[in-house]
Amino acid sequence: MGDVAAHAGVSLKTVSRVVNREAHVRSELADRVRAAIADLGYRPDGRARDLAALPRTGRLAGYVQVDAANPFFSAVHRGLEDVARAHGLLLLSGSTDGDPERESSLVATLVEWRVDGVVVAGAEGADELLLDEIARGTPVVCVDRMLSELVCDTVVSDNADAAEAAVGHLLDRGHRRVAFLGGDHAVWTARERLAGYRRAHEARAVPVDAALLRHDVGAVEPAAAATRDLLRGAAPPTALFTAQDRITTGAITALHELGLQDRVALFGFDEVPFADQLRPSVSVVAQDPYGLGQRSGDLLVARLAGGVAGPPQLVVLDAPLHHRRSGDLPPDPDLVVHDA
Amino acid sequence: MGDVAAHAGVSLKTVSRVVNREAHVRSELADRVRAAIADLGYRPDGRARDLAALPRTGRLAGYVQVDAANPFFSAVHRGLEDVARAHGLLLLSGSTDGDPERESSLVATLVEWRVDGVVVAGAEGADELLLDEIARGTPVVCVDRMLSELVCDTVVSDNADAAEAAVGHLLDRGHRRVAFLGGDHAVWTARERLAGYRRAHEARAVPVDAALLRHDVGAVEPAAAATRDLLRGAAPPTALFTAQDRITTGAITALHELGLQDRVALFGFDEVPFADQLRPSVSVVAQDPYGLGQRSGDLLVARLAGGVAGPPQLVVLDAPLHHRRSGDLPPDPDLVVHDA
DNA sequence: CTGAAAGCGCTTACAG
DNA sequence: CTGAAAGCGCTTACAG
């Protein structure tokens, strides 16, 4: 910037003014400055700018996600990015793989870069550093999962209700043995979806068989293995409720391997690709990850604007059911095990 | 930092030393400093640090992608991220939607933040700002697409060869009317894959019917529409080569709607979800997006380390064919149109 | 309308 | 082993 000032024969402040498009600069000088900028290929230094401009003007935001390569989280990413970009915010992001330590160190790094705020998708409830940061006043919004208490703005789908509706649909079709395949039980969404599963049973006075509950199968292979195991057991389920897209994928894989896809009903949480083309087509609870990202961006931006200073807000998005064939398959009598 | 120094009764430099884990600090002082840091909840300011530490130590890298929500680019993202993280680099990223202007402004913003280098996935060849930046010495690596000339390190799949092999397979199964459905023809990958398509035909002396070539159908709906159109035409293809995952998705959708999935062969570029479970299972050229990301990260890191200062490197990754049912479907005679 | 001074929070030489 | 000074590239008050 000094070079530019010298080149144009003006002071630093004048250069600063034209760079920031401030008023009160004679157009003659401004032209000279612009020429110098072009000649020298000058680019203002964002770090210095940000550092000198206290209080913050709002330029950087952080996005902490479980896995950048997971379509669910990358869709949230895009929703957030679009809102952020509209407000001049650039995103600094990283993946945690669900590891609380990774999450903590990532949050710490983001704070070091003095992001204006951070959106955490799939937060671990036990992340003390994150809790600290919230207490200290860093704007944080959680998407997809809730922290133990509502200590920050949060955007989630209506997990329990949607799960209850899906499982209820299976039960109403006559199924009495519906398996639940869920991810890490420490994760809030998994617990909520299980709660919905239970509520659906309770509402219909159908007992839940604990042998039909499989937790910690939150990836494709474990889910496929659990499906095989359940179906080969002495008292197999006649329907499956898979609490997450990767689990749904694993279950579908296993069902096809066993040739049972038309005999065992399936209702999944999260939309999956080719849901309409698969045979049978697959019924799902369709969350809107892009929308979740957008809403979290809205909340963050509102906090940054400073307008909102009240207590943490909770936004719950509706997750509609997409009824297709797999969820309408009737119980297969040959699969039902009769008591001895 | 001043507060910490005062609190611990030492100088700024001493605080700096313990924060940076430099040697030569009496452990007694170091403890006092650490205590002060904990008491005050001090966090070093990454911006100031980075600004003061010239030349750069390497902390920030940029990732420019077409669309964060596209599974292909998000897998590249993750590959890059893992390498970057291993080298202490944090990623600043954004989506361009293939718009050169968006790409330029994003690159400009990244440069303002003084990223140590940037990886561009799916670069538009015509981005002058990017070319400028490369000329100026900013380490840039292009993944997935090549710029018009090899002006920076580049990592791509063996597009033309893989496409030739896939189309060749179709031709060798007896197909004589193989349609090509591709994305934006301005994009390097689309042109390469078309080149492979042509080479496969030339090698077998099979003429290419221009009516079977559909460009600019790089999204699901346009691809489905093109598929419907081709198949309903007077001289329909007996096989489809879809040059990209979203196109493959669109084609599969249309084929299923028309009930033609078992009568028209299909070979896609890029792996798709449920390729094994779909009926028929779908044959594809399986690029390795995660690997592309990793390799681009390796190249970037090597440049940053300063070891590599030579001419731009070109890394070409093999893209193996995954033969499944759809690519082995024979030509359906009823679909062949005989000359009058 | 324009500029000289001080300061943002750190690190790099340099002394001691 | 420790510290005082200068400087990274900007912006914010303040003067004029």
Image (tube, coloured by chain):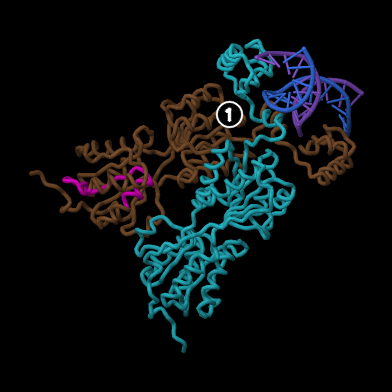
Chain colours: A cyan, B brown, C purple, D blue
Where residue A165 appears, as percent x and y from the top left, is 48, 68
Which segment did they paint magenta? B231-252
The residue carrying pointer 1 sits among few (fewer than 14), some (14 to 19) or many (20 or more) residues within 10 Å by Cα, namely: many
Where residue B256 appears, as percent x and y from the top left, is 29, 56
Q: Nearer the viewer, residue A204 or B178?
A: A204
Q: Quadrant of the C terminus of chain B?
A: top left
- Which residue extends farthest left? B340
* SS type, badge 1: helix
Which residue is painted at 71% across and 53% down in the image?
A: A131
Q: What amino acid is labelled 1 in the image?
A: Val
Q: Nearer the viewer, residue B98 or A219?
A: B98
Number of callouts in the render? 1
Which residue is painted at 36% across and 32% down in the image?
A: B186
Query: Visible in this render: residue B208?
Result: no
Instruction: Using residue A5 as the reference point, say whether residue A209 is left or right of it.
Output: left
Where residue B101 appears, as percent x and y from the top left, is 47, 30
Query: Visible in this render: residue A252?
Result: yes
Q: Is residue A21 magenta?
A: no
Q: Quadrant of the N terminus of chain B?
A: top right
Instruction: Using residue A299 as the reference point, say whether residue D1 is left or right of it.
Output: right
Q: Which residue is mark 1?
A: B111
Q: Chain of mark 1?
A: B
